């Protein structure tokens, strides 16, 4: 098991997240879904070691998160944020090279080998424009690919994507999820992703965790747990599940 | 592999950058000949190539030798060091605070140092040199900023805001001292505050030069890390950086470097803000290029400004006035041109 969470608790005024158990295996997408404010991003940031949680344990590829240094953690787990928020306009290549930070000593800069890894990552995600292009000039979809390429340059076994499809058109939405699936199937990464689009979760995830108000409502393969009753309980609106051409779609 | 190709940079630009890197040496040699005492290039060559020759040998007089080694050389070396140190310090702090409008004095060094110097010049007299007062109170002001802004709500914005408040506090203290100062000490204080490179001899310079050299070298070594530090703190952590440790290292180093520069040269404004901006317009935002080029450009421009300060009139004009007079219009120009570099 690549990521294993036990009894994780994160408390802040007005919000209490409690996940008794969570597992994200290698070579599979695990989707975390739920309404706004359910605690999806909080959960992802806790298990990625970015936010401190008050109780519980997180194991990443067999190591306890609390015993890892920042660099050790980043070599095992790569986190892809929702948006790119740099103050300075780096080129695509300079930006992706930052994924090599965890491998570099304090005074070192990336070498030729790091540039090759960054270039391969850009190739893998299908970024076809010049790597000298400034990041601010890219579209939302291209920027998302560059963020994923930077995470790939970390060469970590676990990839955590926080709402990777938000603000993307249907073509880029599908492209990003297909990429996440390739990373799981071809590179055997454990991919953990938060999503608002339930159709994408049902189609690509091997396992879905439903969160509501900081609590796990359901956890399992979509074929086992998905029901109209569950969706109603989680989202508080009636939803229909319809089957078409062997696939299940959710209609609001 | 298309991504491994060299960055697209024209031959003309490469030559220009090469010129910038050798410019401190050219300006240094030119500036050695500049001054009220006429020393030709050939005499300068003789003096520099035979520093241990006996007085009176050849056409070079002992006075000329003394002018070069005791007056002009320390002044120019100080100009190069202060220009490089302030520019690199400003560029580093801009990265750490993720804000291109930050300068090397943002954490209150200038106000603290000004107050320290005023205590020395106005209240304590010669027994307490302004260099020590400026260095000590410059560090104290930054220490106070970091102390007040630490804790769970620590963030670059809170540090910057605290810097503004502490600066205002020390400015008020400075005004208080100025109010009680005699006209003579007020004039001396004013001269110090405007910044000037002519006041220090070899003895006064040794410690500040060593601090500036060591600190600037450390910041240059961290230039790649500064790229990652310029992202959000959370992004930096996700990429494996010990963000707080690296931020502290850069802020403390930049503070020491700036305090050392201010202690020996007074408050020379605008270099740390404008030089990194100019450099980013030439080479982009990668700090591996921004920092070294800021060092050489800052060094060259400060020595040129000092040349103007000591040549344009019969008396010496404080160099800080020139850097501000050149810097402010330049900054307005940069503001209209640099929207592609930062947001």
Image (spheres, coloured by chain):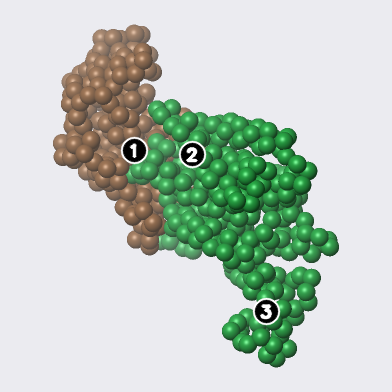
Chain colours: A brown, B green
| Image position, residue B206 (x, y; %) | 53, 63
Seen as rendered, the residue at the extreme right is B314
Residue position for label 1: A79
Q: Are marks 2 and 3 on the same chain?
A: yes
Q: Nearer the viewer, mark 1 or mark 3?
A: 3
Q: Is residue B98 visible?
A: no
Could you give the CA–CA distance between mark 1 and mark 3, rounded to whole angstroms?
A: 63 Å
Q: How many marks?
A: 3
Using the image, name the chain to which the residue with label 1 belongs: A
Q: Picture quarter containing residue B169?
A: top right
Q: Nearer the viewer, residue A251 or A63?
A: A63
Residue position for label 3: B65
Using the image, name the chain to which the residue with label 2 belongs: B
Residue density around tag 2, few if under 14, some if 14–19, many if 20 or more, within 10 Å = some
Report the side of A114 relative to A54 (left or right): right
Q: Nearer the viewer, residue A78 or A224?
A: A78
């Amino acid at each position: 098991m690549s990521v294993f969470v036990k009894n994780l608790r994160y408390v802040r005024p007005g919000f209490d997240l409690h996940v008794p158990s969570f597992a994200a295996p290698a070579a599979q997408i695990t989707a975390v879904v739920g309404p706004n404010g359910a605690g999806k991003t909080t959960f992802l940031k806790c298990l990625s070691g970015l936010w401190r949680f008050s109780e519980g344990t997180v194991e990443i590829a067999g190591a306890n998160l609390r015993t890892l240094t920042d660099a050790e953690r980043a070599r095992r787990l790569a986190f892809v944020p929702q948006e790119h928020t740099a103050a300075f306009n780096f080129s695509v290549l300079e930006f992706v090279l930052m994924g090599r930070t965890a491998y570099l000593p304090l005074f070192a800069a990336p070498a030729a080998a790091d540039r090759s890894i960054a270039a391969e990552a850009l190739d893998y995600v299908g970024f076809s424009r010049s790597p000298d292009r400034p990041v601010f000039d890219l579209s939302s979809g291209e920027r998302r690919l560059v963020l994923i390429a930077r995470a790939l340059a970390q060469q970590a076994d676990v990839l955590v994507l926080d709402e990777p499809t938000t603000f993307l058109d249907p073509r880029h939405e599908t492209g990003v999820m297909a990429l996440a699936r390739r990373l799981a199937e071809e590179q055997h990464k454990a991919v953990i992703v938060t999503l608002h689009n339930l159709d994408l979760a049902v189609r690509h995830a091997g396992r879905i965790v439903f969160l509501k108000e900081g609590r796990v409502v359901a956890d399992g393969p979509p074929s086992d747990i998905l029901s109209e009753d569950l969706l109603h309980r989680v989202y508080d609106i009636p939803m229909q599940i319809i089957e078409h051409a062997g696939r299940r779609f959710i209609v609001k | 592999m298309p991504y491994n190709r060299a960055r697209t940079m024209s031959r003309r630009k490469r030559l220009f950058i090469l010129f910038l890197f050798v410019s401190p040496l050219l300006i240094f040699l030119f500036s050695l000949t500049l001054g009220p005492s006429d020393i030709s290039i050939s005499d300068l060559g003789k003096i520099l190539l035979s520093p241990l020759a006996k007085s009176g040998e050849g056409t070079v007089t002992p006075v000329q030798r003394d002018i070069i080694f005791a007056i002009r050389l320390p002044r120019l070396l100080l100009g190069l060091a202060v220009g490089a140190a302030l520019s690199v310090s400003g560029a580093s702090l801009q990265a750490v605070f993720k804000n291109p409008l930050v300068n090397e004095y943002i954490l209150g060094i200038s106000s603290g140092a000004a107050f320290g110097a005023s205590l020395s010049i106005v209240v304590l007299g010669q027994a307490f040199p302004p260099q020590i007062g400026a260095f000590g109170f410059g560090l104290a002001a930054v220490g106070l900023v970091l102390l007040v802004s630490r804790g769970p709500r620590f963030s670059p914005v809170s540090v910057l805001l605290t810097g503004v408040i502490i600066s205002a506090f020390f400015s008020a203290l400075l005004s208080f001292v100025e109010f009680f100062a005699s006209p003579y000490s007020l004039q001396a204080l004013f001269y110090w505050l405007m910044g000037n490179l002519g006041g220090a001899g070899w003895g006064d310079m040794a410690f500040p030069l060593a601090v500036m050299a060591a600190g600037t070298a450390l910041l240059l070594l961290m230039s790649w890390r500064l790229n990652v530090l310029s992202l959000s703190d959370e992004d930096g952590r996700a990429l494996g950086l010990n963000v707080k440790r690296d931020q502290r290292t850069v802020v403390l180093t930049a503070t020491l470097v700036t305090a050392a520069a201010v202690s020996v040269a007074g408050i020379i404004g605008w270099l740390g803000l404008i030089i990194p901006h100019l450099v980013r317009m030439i080479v982009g935002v990668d700090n591996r290029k921004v920092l070294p080029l800021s060092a050489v450009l800052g060094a060259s421009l400060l020595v040129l400004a000092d040349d103007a300060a000591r040549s344009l009139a019969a008396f010496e004009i404080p160099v800080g006035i020139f850097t501000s007079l050149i810097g402010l219009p330049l900054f307005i120009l940069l503001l209209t041109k640099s929207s592609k570099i930062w947001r």
